[in-house]
Each structure stands twice: as C-alpha cells, then as structure tokens.
C-alpha cells in the first residue's frame, strides 16, 4: 500500500510535468497551457476520491499553489507561459479547489472538482481552436461551441457521481455550463460558488 507522501508526490508529478511541458510550448499558447494545467489535477482529484489523499492534504496543497501563483502576480513576475497579467483565474481555481473538499461531501466535491478541471479545460480548448481559426481574440471571447463541450463533459462526470435522477444530472450540467459562460464573474469563482449552492438542492 502506498503511503500518503508517495501518493501526493505522484499527484504533484503530474502537475509539475504539465507545468514543464507548457513552459516549452511558450507564451503564445498561454490560454491552452492554462487548460492543460487544469487537466493535470485530475489524478490528484481521483486519488482524493478513492481516499489515497486526505482531505486536508489536498486542500492544503491547492492553497499553497494558489499562494505561489498569487505571489508571481504581486511581484509582477508572471509565469508568462500560462499566467496572464491582470487575470487571476488560475489563483481563483487553486483557492476554490482548496475550499471545496472542506465544505462538500467527497462524491459531490469530486464531481465539482472534475467539472472545474475537465469541463473547463475542454471548453477552453474548443473555443480557442474555433476562434483562432476565425481570427478572433481568443483571450477575450467565449463561444457556444465551448459551452456545448462543457455541458457534455459535465454530464458525463455527473452520471456516475451524483446521486440524483437523470433530470437532476442534466440540470446540474446545464447550470454549471451557464455559470461558466456568464460574463460578470470569473468562471473559476462562479462555477465553484454555483456548484456549492446547487448542493443544497441535491
């Protein structure tokens, strides 16, 4: 049986490998690089779900990542291959990921964390590809094609993890998709907040 330190090291290795790979891709791909780093937390989330990573370790590690990334912004020394000046989405993502396991049951927390990591990542990549082909500024625009990707992946996550009927799972995926798409609040805050409020209905 793997001990906690080894499991955490394996989970961190995925994240650090994603950071190393995206650094080689460079600043031009910053928007995609952010999504690749989102994907890289999936092994950690699944290890948390299966009990290999304790709640407090997952939460504490995510909080440390958030602080380190915030420090880069404060010093105005952004890691330019995935951090964007005046955009704090990756910090909101890390801090949200640190809170969710502390306030939600493990199955629901896992579903919400996976939606933040996978659905958001898929959405960003679809939008980036579509808008890049059409010559738009992919850093500033959202598109319905990405939202469809969000809905499909969130529904696939909800099906095995949420203990509600099919209509409830479709509703969950739809509302999170709308929370991601809305223009008023960073989606890395909006989705966790809305997801936590939805738990009161589930």
Image (cartoon, helix red, strand yellow):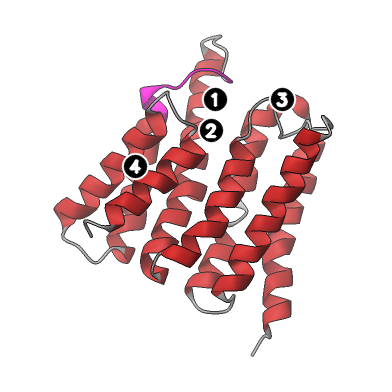
Query: How far apart are the alpha carbons under marks 4 and 1?
Result: 20 Å
Q: Is residue 190 left or right of residue 27?
A: left
Which label number is shown at residue 128?
1
* Residue corresponding to mark 4: 176
The quarter in which the C terminus is drawn is: bottom left
Above or below, 4 against 131 in this view is below
Q: Earlier in the sequence, mark 1 or mark 3?
A: 3
* Residue corresponding to mark 2: 125
Is the residue under label 2 in contact with that under label 1 (CB below 8 Å)?
yes
| Spot occupied by residue 10 in the image (x, y as percentages of width and height) | 71, 69
| Mark 2 neighbour class, 10 Å CA radius: few under 14, some 14 to 19, many 20 or more | many
- Element class at badge 4: helix
State the extent of the magenta-drawn residues as a range. 139-146
Query: How far apart are the alpha carbons under marks 1 and 2?
Result: 5 Å
Closer-to-camera residue (15/152): 15
The residue under the point 70% across, 53% down is: 65
Query: How far apart are the alpha carbons under marks 1 and 3?
Result: 19 Å
Which label number is shown at residue 85?
3
Q: Is residue 100 left or right of residue 33?
A: left
């Amino acid at each position: 049986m793997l001990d906690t330190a080894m499991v955490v090291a394996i989970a961190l290795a995925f994240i650090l490998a994603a950071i190393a790979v995206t650094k080689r891709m460079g600043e031009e791909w910053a928007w995609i690089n952010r999504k690749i780093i989102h994907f890289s937390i999936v092994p950690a989330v699944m290890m948390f779900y299966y009990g290999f990573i304790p709640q407090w370790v997952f939460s504490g590690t995510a909080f440390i990542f958030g602080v380190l990334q915030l420090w880069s912004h404060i010093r105005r020394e952004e890691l330019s291959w995935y951090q964007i000046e005046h955009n704090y989405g990756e910090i909101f993502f890390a801090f949200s990921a640190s809170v969710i396991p502390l306030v939600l049951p493990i199955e629901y927390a896992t579903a919400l964390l996976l939606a933040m990591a996978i659905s958001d990542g898929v959405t960003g990549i679809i939008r980036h590809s579509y808008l890049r082909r059409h010559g738009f500024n992919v850093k500033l625009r959202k598109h319905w094609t990405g939202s469809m990707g969000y809905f499909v992946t969130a529904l696939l996550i909800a099906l095995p993890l949420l203990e509600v009927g099919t209509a409830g799972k479709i509703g969950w995926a739809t509302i999170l998709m709308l929370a991601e798409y809305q223009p008023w609040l960073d989606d890395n805050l909006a989705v966790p907040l809305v997801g936590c409020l939805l738990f009161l209905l589930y």
